[in-house]
Amino acid sequence: ATPLISPKAIMKKPRTAVRSRPRKQASRQEGREKCVLSSSQVKPPTPNGTMPEFPGAPAGLARWQEEVVVQASVSPYHLFRGTAEVRAFRENLLRWYDREKRDLPWRRRAEGEVDLDRRAYAVWVSEVMLQQTQVATVIDYYTRWMQKWPTLQDLASASLEGVNQLWAGLGYYSRGRRLHEGARKVVEELGGHVPRTAETLQQLLPGVGRYTAGAIASIAFGQATGVVDGNVVRVLCRVRAIGADSSSALVSQHLWSLAQQLVDPARPGDLNQAAMELGATVCTPQHPRCSQCPVRSLCRAHQRVSHLGKGQAGVLEGDPCPPSSGQCRLCAPPSEPWDPTLGVTNFPRKASRRPPREECSATCVLEQPRAVGGPRILLVQRPNSGLLAGLWEFPSVTTEPSGQRQRQALLQELQRWAGPLPATRLRHLGQVVHTFSHIKLTYEVYSLALEGETPVTTTPPGARWLTREEFHTAAVSTAMKKVFRVYEGRRPGACKGSKRSPVSTPSSRKKPSPGQQLLDSFFRPHIPSDAPSLNSTAQ
C-alpha cells in the first residue's frame, strides 16, 4: 500500500505553547489536522477545540502518534475519500436513525432529562448493562434498577449485597460491583458530578473503558468522540472492506480512527447510537439486510458483491487493494480468500477463539427439612474477588471429575459450615454444565437432608440458612439456579412433567425459524471494545 504521510509527518511533534493546557491541546489538534487532511481525511474537533481522545503527553501523545503511524500505512481503499463521503455517511445514517430507531427506556430517560449528571447516570447504567447482554434481557433489569436507584446518590447509598441481588442472572457480575464503586466515587470524591469528557471518565471511574467513556461523553454531554463496539466493528469492516482479524491491535486502532472521523459534531451521541443500531438491526452477523441499509451505496463489501455476484471470481476493476494480494495489513490474508457464498459476511473476520478451560466442582444442597419456620437450605458467600465475587452459592469444592475423593472433599466442606454430618446420606443427583466466558464448569450435584438432627440455629460468618422463597430472590448466579432446579426435580413428590434438563446440548436445540432469527438480530447485544476486561467474571 502506498504511504499517505511522509516520515517527517509521522514523528512530527505538536508545537510547544507557553499558555494553558487547552492551548497545548489546540496546538496538537492543529498539527494532527494537517496530517489527516494530507491523506484526504476529515476529523471533526471536539466542541471546545481540543484534540479528542488524547488527554495529554505522554500517554495522549503516544496514542496520537500511534494513530498517525497506522494512517500512514493504510491504503486509500480502507479510508473515506473526503468530506463529501463523510458527510453523505452521516446524513444517510442519521436520517435512517431518526426514522427507524427502537424505543428503549434508557433513550427515553436520557432524552427527557435536563440535569446532566442524571442524564449521564442513565446512559452509564444502560451502557454497562448492555455489555455482552441482549437488549431484550436488559430492558427489565434496567427498569427495575432505575426504579430502585433513580440517582447516583441512591446507588451510592445502596449496599453491594443489594446491587448483587438485583444484578443476579444478568451475568458478568463485576459490572454491577464497579458501577456501584463508580457511583460512590462520584458522590464521595467528585462532588456528585460525573466527569464531562471521555478522557476524564476513563481516568476517574472504575470499570469505565474507552468505549463506555465515549458513549457517556457523546450521548450525555455532546462530546464529539467516536465509539467502537461489536456492532460498529461489523459495520465499519464491511463499509471499508477490512478483512484482517478485527480483534488485532492494528485493525482496532484503525476502526477507532474511522469512528472518530465519522462522528457528527452536531449530533455525536445520535451518530454513535445510529451506527450501533445499524449493526444490531440491519448489518447483522449472519443475515444482513443490505436492501434496507442507508449506507449501502458507500459500502465496499456491498459493492464487491454487486460487482462480482455470488458465483463469480476476481476483483473490482481499479481496486487498489485486491483481497488476496497479501500486501495490505487490513485485507484478509491470502490463506483466507474471498468466499463468494458468504457475500458481505466475509467481513469482519476474527481469529478463532481459544476454547474455555474445563473444570469440575462438587456442590451440595444441604437442607434442614424440619427447621423452625419451615425447610431451609444452606448458602455460603464466595470471596470478594475473582469469579462470581461476593455472590452466594451452595457449599462447593473444586475437585476431580469423579471418585470417592470427590465425596470426601465435599463432605469436609459441608462440615466446615454445618458441623458433623452423616456421610451416608450424601446423595448424587446429576450434573450441571455451565460455561462462563473462559471456563466450562461441570457441577456434580449432591444433596443431604438433616432429617433427625437438632435444627442448626447458628452459622459461622459467610453462611446463611434460607427458605426456598428467599433463595429465589438472593444474589445467586445462574449456575446455582440450574443446580437448584436439578435438586427440586429429584425431590420426593416433585412433578415429573416439570423437571427440566440440567444440560442443553446442541443436538437437542431446534434450528430457529427465519422469523425468530430476525427477532434475535433485533435484540442482539452490542460488544464494546473494552469488553475484554469483563472476562475476569461471568454469569
Image: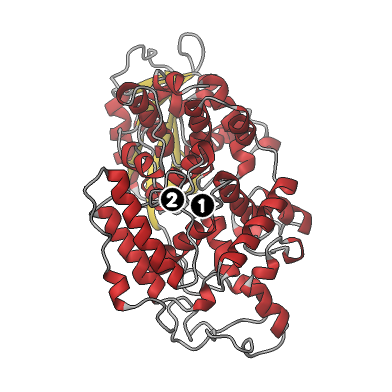
Instruction: Give the amino acid type for the residue marked by disc 2 in the picture.
Output: Ala
Q: Residues within 10 Å of mark 2 (few under 14, many from 20)?
A: some
User: What residue appears at the point 41 percent right and 71 percent down from the top-left corner?
Assistant: 71
Give the labeled residue for mark 1.
527
As displayed, is residue 36 above or below residue 144? below
User: What residue appears at the point 32 percent right and 72 percent down from the top-left corner?
Assistant: 9
Identify the image quadrant of residue 343.
bottom right
CB contact under 8 Å: marks 2 and 1: yes
Instruction: Give the amino acid type for the residue marked by disc 1 in the picture.
Output: Ile
Distance, label 2 to label 1, CA atoms, is 6 Å
Provide the secondary structure element on which disc 2 rests: helix
As displayed, is residue 108 above or below residue 523? above
Which mark identifies residue 238?
none
- Return the residue nearer the eye: 473 or 146: 146
The image position of residue 172, as x and y in percent, is: 45, 42
- Return the residue nearer the eye: 21 or 127: 21
The image position of residue 347, as x and y in percent, is: 57, 71
Residue 538 seen in the current view: no
The image position of residue 251, as x and y in percent, is: 44, 68
Residue that sits furthest to the front in the current view: 18
As displayed, is residue 432 above or below residue 30? above
Provide the secondary structure element on which disc 1 rests: loop
Image quarter in which the N terminus is found: bottom left
Colour setting: secondary structure
Residue 397 seen in the current view: yes
Give the labeled residue for mark 2.
531
- Return the residue nearer the eye: 471 or 376: 471
User: What residue appears at the point 37 percent right and 62 percent down from the top-left corner?
Assistant: 32
